Amino acid sequence: KIPFTISEKAYYQWVDGAEGARGTTITIKGYAKSLNLSFSKIYFQDQAFDVVPEFNGTDFVLSATRRELYKPDLIMSGDPADEFGNRPPGAAKSKIPFDLEDDEAVLEYSVNGRESYYKVSGIEKLDKDL
């Protein structure tokens, strides 16, 4: 039995055209059933998000954002030495130890220092214009 209850779960994807960045923000809200509960990571859409939970009494909010540049400068040249430093396609993706659908996440949490994992399904995608 898990030491918390999830009340809300949603994510949105955003683009910052001025800086050439894009990202995903995920938010999970709930309440704790244990005083010694802590959260450290959210695994979501092939990414590991570090999380710093906000507690207000037994209520908590987990919010995490992953940001990446989506238009890196590529050097195209006939001389391979000039292209040193270009990143190969797909190199920014990290592989997580879980096989998840797009609306699923795994929470890494601990109680009294004992680490555990909990799968959250049905995470709602929000449409946000930022």
Image (cartoon, rainbow, N blue to C red):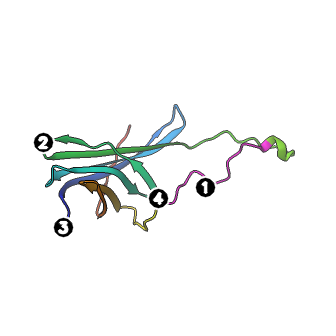
Looking at the image, residue 126 lies above or below residue 130:
below
Q: Are marks 2 and 4 in contact (CB under 8 Å)?
A: no
**C-alpha separation, residue under disc 1 versus residue under disc 3:** 38 Å
- Of tags 2 and 4, which is closer to the observer? 2
Extent of the magenta region: 83-96
Label 3 is placed on what type of residue?
Lys
Q: Amino acid at mark 2?
A: Gly
Residue beneath the point at 71% across and 45% down: 86
Classify 10 Å Cα crowding around label 1: few (below 14), some (14-19), many (20 and above). few
Which residue is denoted by mark 2 in the rendering?
57
For marks 3 and 4, the one nearer the N-term is 3
Identify the residue under disc 1.
Answer: 90
Relative to residue 96, is residue 51 drawn left or right? left
Identify the residue at image location x=20%, y=63%: 2
User: Is 10 positioned to the left or the right of 14 in the image?
Assistant: left
* Residue 29 shows up from this direction: no
Residue furthest out toward the right: 79
